[in-house]
Image: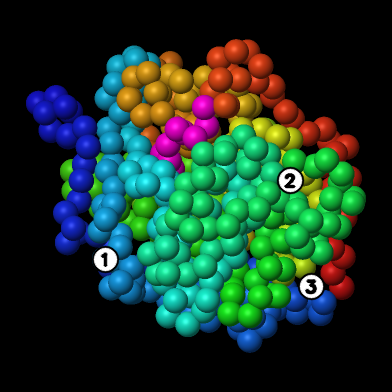
Amino acid sequence: MTDKNRIPYKIYLEENEMPQSWYNVRADMANKPAPLLNPGTGQPLKAEELTPIFCEELVQQELDNENAYIPIPQEIRDFYRMYRPSPLVRAYCLEEKLQTPAKIYYKFEGNNTSGSHKLNSAIAQAYYAKKQGLRGVTTETGAGQWGTALSMACSYFDLDCKVYMVKVSYEQKPFRREVMRTYGASVTPSPSDTTEVGRAILKEHPGTTGSLGCAISEAVEAATKNEGYRYVLGSVLNQVLLHQSVIGLETKAALDKYGIKADMIIGCAGGGSNLGGLISPFMGEKLRGEADYQIIAVEPSSCPSFTRGTYAYDFCDTGMICPLAKMYTLGSSFIPAPNHAGGLRYHGMSPILSQLYDDGLMEARSVRQTDVFQAAETFARVEGILPAPESSHAIRAAIDEAMKCKETGEEKTIVFGLTGTGYFDMTAYEKFHNGEMENYVPSDDEIAASLARLPRLN
């Protein structure tokens, strides 16, 4: 019996097979992620210090290192049913194109209007804000996927939504901006002159195209200066990786349904939301000694937090007003080159993923922009989905690993995360097709200058 007869192209779970709890990988980590620190005192932050910024229940999730499973509220599960379970797809056509013995699967998270996995956490954070009785939330967005998802979630719960969008993406992706506005969000290019921190950044970096770190600073300031608002974040934080664990839980359940054992799990890495969500249950098995997997984080060469950064405490934002997180970082003042993977333009990496990487439980590699789009085009032509630039970093690594299998004859099973679609990224595809795309790579001196500004702790 051939694989095609035994395993369908798309593996769907039934609604009653959807996860009823999020999985908290921290519970199984021997070395827990380092705590967030108060930048003024250098001491671990307490819940009461975080509640002026974040929703109360989200603060509890952020600090919870002990509970392995946290029930998903019924209201959130009901919303998930609009687009979940998402399919796990066997990339038969890509395998045929590559003539590889590898078996390639991708978890497709682009089957909702936001076009990405971001809605998994956006609806949870909006739910907790509404439950707390807040008027609205503020946030940042890079490529626009998180801003789109949050605007949808806030519209669903009748919350106000203020989005600070990285300026280069604001200019490159006007239609993404308009989707947010369609759902009722206000969208401001960042850095802007509407906040004190935005004005300071513009003074120090006139003409800057912005970064996620800049946008975070503005969103946090807006939240703390507007009564009835809280700040929400689409990546990096523990709570976000918790919500995104539905991706990995569904992936593992779909594989188990057909008795499939993955050899490697691959995800793109910017702040860590998609990668962390995808790998969580597999990493849990690895931590508990139940199974072993090769786990690969793929990041852009233009913003190489894992591969060229330093593991240290750093500010989560360029304006240096947020708590300090211990993470692999390029320095909060690092402004990435204006590449076309806006969601991966962040100077640091999730504290959870940083600890796992530092413990040698996963590996990382960086890839050049033109190589990423070459892989995206190959995938689009044979699999029928136009992938987002962020997701295409994982596609690049999956193709590379499949070609290694072709050379060695190994029949490895590769699973990667296809975080979303690229229909708002046609400017990037146009530059690639016209031969105008550049491979921005920061120099050692640029990274060293940024790292020299890391906070000094006693």
Q: Nearer the viewer, mark 2 or mark 3?
A: 2
Please tell me whether mark 3 sits on a helix, a strand or a loop: loop
- The majority secondary structure of the magenta stretch comes to loop
The quarter of the picture where residue 408 lies is top left
x then y, percent, for residue 94 = 34, 22
Q: Measuring 37% from the left and 18% from the top, which residue is drawn there?
A: 381
Name the residue that disc number 1 marks. 78
Highlighted range, magenta: 418-426
Q: Nearer the viewer, mark 3 or mark 1?
A: 1
Residue 210 bears which disc, if any?
2
Instruction: Using a 10 Å C-alpha cutoff, classify the residue at mark 1 as few (fewer than 14 neighbours), some (14 to 19) or many (20 or more).
Output: few
- Circle 3: residue type: Pro
Q: Is 305 included in the stretch rendered in magenta?
A: no
Q: Measuring 60% from the left and 65% from the top, which residue is drawn there?
A: 138
- Circle 1: residue type: Asp
Please tell me whether mark 1 sits on a helix, a strand or a loop: helix
Q: Measuring 63% from the left and 80% from the top, which residue is drawn there?
A: 227
- Circle 2: residue type: Gly
